[in-house]
């Protein structure tokens, strides 16, 4: 619960309203294969709480400019995340 609360605070502080998460699989060095369509989560309605804690942690680390497995990019108030499985 605390993890989700601080994650939400971090997203709100940065003005992020929507998360779009896409999970990928790596088959060869440097080659990513997308294994599913992006899943969108709203920060306002709390649907982001369905995100696994490990993924939340990777996103938090990336937003704090720390090393992370997640590839994060931002366009306006939407955060696009690619996470390797």
Image (tube, grey):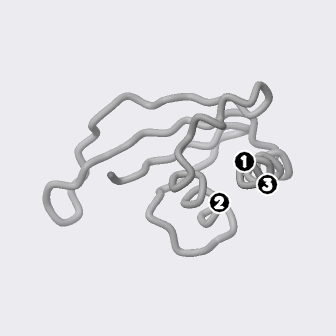
Q: Is 41 situated left or right of 11 in this image?
A: left
Give the image location of residue 22, x and y in percent.
42, 39
Q: Residues within 10 Å of mark 3 (few under 14, many from 20)?
A: few
Q: Label 1, on which residue?
A: 4
* Residue 49 image-quadrant placement: top right
Disc 2 versus disc 3: nearer the observer? 3
Q: Residue at x 32, y 52 (%)?
A: 85
Q: Are marks 1 and 3 in contact (CB under 8 Å)?
A: yes
User: SS at mark 3?
Assistant: helix
Residue drawn 25% across the image and 49% down it: 25
Which mark is on residue 60? 2
Query: Residue 71 has which mark?
Result: none
Left or right of 64 on screen, residue 32: left
Residue 8 appears at what percent x and percent y?
77, 46
Label 2–label 3 contact, CB within 8 A = yes
Task: From the image, tell me which residue sits under label 3.
Answer: 6
* Residue at the extreme top of the image, as rendered: 45
Q: Is residue 26 left or right of residue 44?
A: left
Q: CA distance from mark 1 to mark 3?
A: 6 Å
N-terminal of the pair, mark 2 or mark 3, is 3
Q: Is residue 48 above or below residue 72?
A: above
Label 2 to label 1, Cα distance in Å?
11 Å
């Amino acid at each position: 619960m605390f993890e989700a609360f601080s994650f939400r605070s971090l997203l709100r502080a940065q003005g992020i309203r929507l998360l779009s998460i896409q999970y990928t699989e790596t088959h060869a060095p440097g080659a990513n294969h997308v294994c599913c369509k992006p899943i969108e989560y709203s920060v306002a309605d709390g649907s982001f709480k369905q995100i696994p804690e490990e993924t939340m942690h990777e996103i938090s680390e990336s937003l704090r400019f720390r090393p992370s497995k997640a590839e994060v990019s931002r366009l306006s108030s939407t955060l696009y995340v690619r996470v390797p499985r």
